[in-house]
Every structure is written in structure tokens, then in C-alpha cells.
Image (cartoon, rainbow, N blue to C red):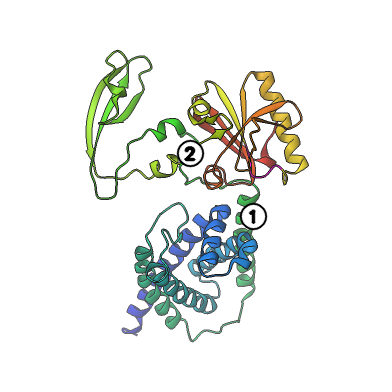
Amino acid sequence: MKRTRPIRILSHICRLILACTFIFSGFTKVIDPWGTALKVSEYLSIYGMEKLQPAAMTFSIWLCGAELMMGCMLLCKVRIRLVSIFAMLSMIFFTVLTFLSATVIPVEDCGCFGEALKLTPWETFLKNLILLPLSIVVWWRYRPDKVFAFKPVEILLTCTFFFLSMYLGYYCYIHLPLIDFLPYKVGVNIHEAMQAPSVAPGETETVLIYRNLHTGEEREFALDDPTWQDATTWEWVDTRTTSEVPNVRPLISEFALHNAAGDATEEVLTTPGRLYMLCVTSFDKLSTRCRERMAQLVARAQREGSHVVCLTPDPLYDATGHDFGTGSVPCYNIDASTMKTMLRARNGMVVLDDGTITAKKNCRDIRP
């Protein structure tokens, strides 16, 4: 009895750690099915399985939903024997996969925690190397139990966890992620974020903090940025030296808009007042209903005196605008990956107020 008690305590600790890890990992990925699908497509391409890429979104929702479901079942000890087998097999598979990703076929980010937490392939492998023995302990502890002897309450909980996990992924697919971990989140001023100083990993940087004498707003400047030298506009507040690397700057700095006249990034991002940016992946594949919603939004913007532009990775062929049905809208080219980072949807809308993102909508959620 004395010998089994420590083993039970250890198995409970291992089960809780595994459950929390699976829940966090599954949740952060299933709420961003578009981002997870991109990572799945990357892996399929790396391992020569491009034919399966059309099913990347389905894999994204099902695999991440299953991970979230497995974590919930571990936490509540629902059919623990069966789940412990799946947990151990999953950890063996992903430990091998992340080892290959860190050595034979390197990738920049394994995506195990989605956009919420970035780990290098070696960090991910080390994480899996720690979790693998924990899954073995849980499997060993519950190996005497029957595998498929479900109690009625366990059947109910299993179905509940399955439905909630899969529906969460589907909901975020047809709308937008419940939590936005990306750089282009609501509240971010894209133009200002593009000007933020950036340093390489391991380096330190000196940041000057100045206050705008007219607006009272504080802003950070790099030493080589001469803007702060205007004494009629800026007042020194503080100087800070840091070794932290901004995680927004690398992606934000890639934001660029072009049309037949050339680079229009500055012009669009500094538009005063409200600006509706209609994001269209492909005009040829734009549904009639989505086109109607965008046309109604353009008409509403015209009535309220707001600005509207259209962003698309589709070739414009020197075209400067696009007519959704209520007049031509200025159109600009944007990189496809940048648009997918800004808006996790095939088509939709991003609203800027004086350059700051105040709303993002999937096309089906646009309400004129």
C-alpha cells in the first residue's frame, strides 16, 4: 500500500500535466484553423505529400480538435485507459516528427502551440522528450483497466467533448479566431508598428521615448531615427536599453501595398478617419452573397464619408480599381501570406480608424 501511493500520486501529476498541455496546445490551434492549415500544408509539402494539401483545413480542425478532446478526457479521467494509449502514441509520433524537423528537414517553427507561443524545433523536441515519459507513466498506471468498457456518463462526456472541440474549430473557420494572437490584432496601429525598432536575437538596443507636445502621445524611436530631433514636436521622456526582441516587427514590416502607380503603403495607412479595407483572395471565386455584402458596405461608407479600398493578391493587370456593384473602389496588391496573417479568412474586412485596427470581419459577418 505504501509503495502504490507514491505511484498513484506520480501518475496523477503526469496525467494533469499532459492534460493541460494537450488542452492548451489543442485550443490555441483549433481556434485558428486557417493558420494551422497553413502549417499542415507546409509539413505536407516538406514530406512530399502535396496531393493531400486540399484536405489541410479538414486535417487542421480534426487533428487539433482531437488533441483538445484528448486533453479534456485526460483531465476528467474519461475512459482513461483508451486515452492513455492515444496520448502515448501521439507523443511517440510527434517526438519523432519534431526530431526530424530539427535535424533532417529543418523548419522555422513547428507550430505546436499555434501563434500563441513560438518554439524552435529543438525547443519543441525537448518539450516532447519531457512529455513522452509522462505519457508512458499514465499508460502504465492504467494498463489494467478495460479499453472499451464505457460507462454511460463516459459516453455522454466523450460525445460532449467531441462536439465542442469540433464545433469550436468550425466556428472559428466560418468566422474568425476567438482570440487573435497575430501581430495585426485589434488595437494595433500598422503604420506605427512598422516604424518600431527591431534588433537581432541576442543583441541589445537603445530606445528613446519621446512625448508628442501636441497630442501627448508617447512614442519609441531608434537612435538612427531623426524624427525625434524636432524639438517643436517631441519632448524627451526616457531612454531604455533592452535585449528583448519585438515579436511584432518582423511580420508587420512585411506589410506592403502596390498598384499601377507603385508603392501605396504610406498613402493607405496614413488615411485620416475611417478606412474600410476589403480583403479578397480571388475575384473569380468571390461568392455572389459576399460581393453583395461588400457592395452594401461600399454604399454605406459613401454615405458616412468614410474611405474604402480593396486589397487582393490577385494580379491587377494595371487596373486601379474594382467595382463591387456600387462604384469603383481603389484596389491594391498585397502579398497573400501577409493578407492571411492580417485576416484569417478567405474574404473579409479590416477597419482602420486613423491607422489603428478597430475591427476585423469575415465576409459572412459583414453587416452593412
Q: Return the mark for residue 350.
A: none
Task: Look at the numbered disc 2 and give the secondary structure of its residue.
Answer: loop
The region drawn magenta spans 279-283
Instruction: Give x and y (percent) for residue 94.
Output: 45, 71
* Picture layout, residue 332 above or below residue 123: above
Task: Look at the numbered disc 1 and give the secondary structure of its residue.
Answer: helix
Res. 327 image quadrant? top right
Horizontal arrangement in the rendering, residue 195 relative to residue 44 (left or right): left
Which quadrant is the N terminus positioned in? Answer: bottom left
Task: Between residue 243 and residue 27, name the one nearer to us.
Answer: 243
Pick whichever of labels 1 and 2 is earlier in the sequence. Answer: 1
Q: Real-space Cα distance between discs 1 and 2?
A: 28 Å
Q: Label 1: which residue?
A: 170
Regarding residue 189, the answer to whether it shows in the image is no
**Hey, what amino acid is under mark 1?**
Tyr
Prevalent SS, magenta region: loop
* Picture layout, residue 109 above or below residue 282: below
Residues packed near mark 2 inside 10 Å, few (<14), some (14 to 19) or many (20 plus): some
* Picture layout, residue 281 above or below residue 261: below
Residue drawn 32% across the image and 40% down it? 198
Q: Is residue 256 magenta?
A: no
**Hey, what amino acid is under mark 2?**
Phe
Which quadrant is the C terminus positioned in? Answer: top right
Q: Label 2: which residue?
A: 255
Horizontal arrangement in the rendering, residue 324 relative to residue 175 (left or right): right
* Picture layout, residue 360 above or below residue 4: above
Residue drawn 35% across the image and 83% down it? 4
Horizontal arrangement in the rendering, residue 171 relative to residue 70 (left or right): right
Task: Between residue 197 and residue 296, name the one nearer to us.
Answer: 197
Instruction: Give x and y (percent) for residue 322.
Output: 69, 32
